[in-house]
Image (cartoon, rainbow, N blue to C red):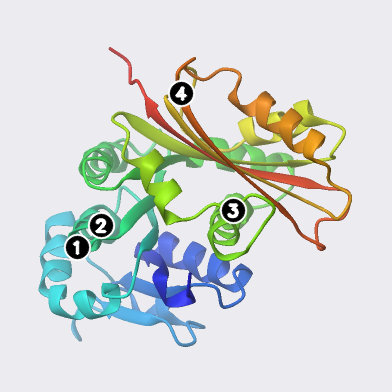
Amino acid sequence: MEASQILIAGVGGLGCSWAKGAHLRCEGNADLCLVDADDASFTDSGSAHLLRLGHALDSVGCAALPPLAEQRMRGYSSLARTVLEPVELVLLLTGLGGGTGTGAAHELARQARQSGAIVVAVAALSFDVQETRAQIAQEGLHRLENIAHVTVRLSLERLARQARERGKAWQMGAEWVEDLVEGLVRTLMRMGLINLDLMDLRAIVEKEGEATLLVGTGRPDDPEGILHSALMAPLAELDVGGAQGCLIQVEGGIGMTIGQVDEVANMFTEALDPNAQVILGARVSEDLEDTIRVVTLLSGIRGES
């Protein structure tokens, strides 16, 4: 794959902040697109594609008006089509509950799918105490999930709690998002012992039901610790047991063995549906000395009945 075939797209203030950080981690292996009504989101954007949803008189945002953001995003369809033309995979990062993220994210996802791209979205849900924003966020989440192939629900409550435990502000807790994006980009861009490609990704994401992504890291001799690391992700509640599809990429240092790959893969897949389709990839990376990192995409998850 070429870098122009993967697009990291940030929508809204939080999404743009995360997208810029994730893009830096990907070292030129993906393009960047930023969408917001607040020009402050476009600082330090380098060569990114910029879609300004604000006008000269209201450059500080769409307030809490998702329909306005959606309308303006739809007005950019011809420009967005040019940006999306070479793209095979869109990694869409956004926060829901405000105007721009809630209104424009699902419209960008719609345009990306219309162009033929796979759309993987990471959507941050509002804090529970923000009742109005939380309600708006749920409406936006429903629309985004109906369009994106995969929508990873990120809990700001859980993210903030984990950040406090590490003595950091929750706004700085973007490492997990960056790990996820970098892991998925590296999975598709680099050759490995067992290679994965977009056809593998598409085979998994097109299964009916909900889907999510997990990223775990740890020592090669501690597969349980790697799984625990993945399950500590700041995700909203979702029972992944019984998932019917799984794409799993195991990446480790020069000393990683096939036996270690199998052990880790088995740890991540034992709770799946017995007839689940599992696609395994593995790669040796010199920068992961005495460490294994696992990126897992789970699909065909049955929602609560």
Q: CA distance from mark 4 to mark 3?
A: 20 Å
| Proximity of marks 4 and 1: CB atoms separated by less than 8 Å | no
- Image x and y of residue 268, in percent: 63, 28
Secondary structure state at the residue bearing disc 3 = loop
Secondary structure state at the residue bearing disc 1 = helix
Q: CA distance from mark 2 to mark 4?
A: 27 Å
In the drawing, does residue 37 fall left or right of residue 244?
A: left
| Proximity of marks 1 and 2: CB atoms separated by less than 8 Å | yes
Q: Amino acid at mark 2?
A: Ala
Q: Which mark is residue 276?
A: 4
Could you tell which of marks 2 and 3 lies nearer the N-terminus?
Answer: 2
Query: Relative to 183, is 275 above or below?
Result: above
In the drawing, does residue 30 fall left or right of residue 89?
A: right
For mark 1, what is the residue? 111
- Image x and y of residue 221, in percent: 87, 33
For mark 2, what is the residue? 109
Is label 2 or label 4 in front? 4
Say which residue appears at 52% left-offset and 83% top-offset. Answer: 44
Q: Amino acid at mark 4?
A: Ala
Secondary structure state at the residue bearing disc 4 = loop
User: Quarter-wise, where is residue 259 in the image?
Assistant: top right
Does residue 126 appear anywhere in the picture? Answer: no
Is label 4 or label 1 in front? 4
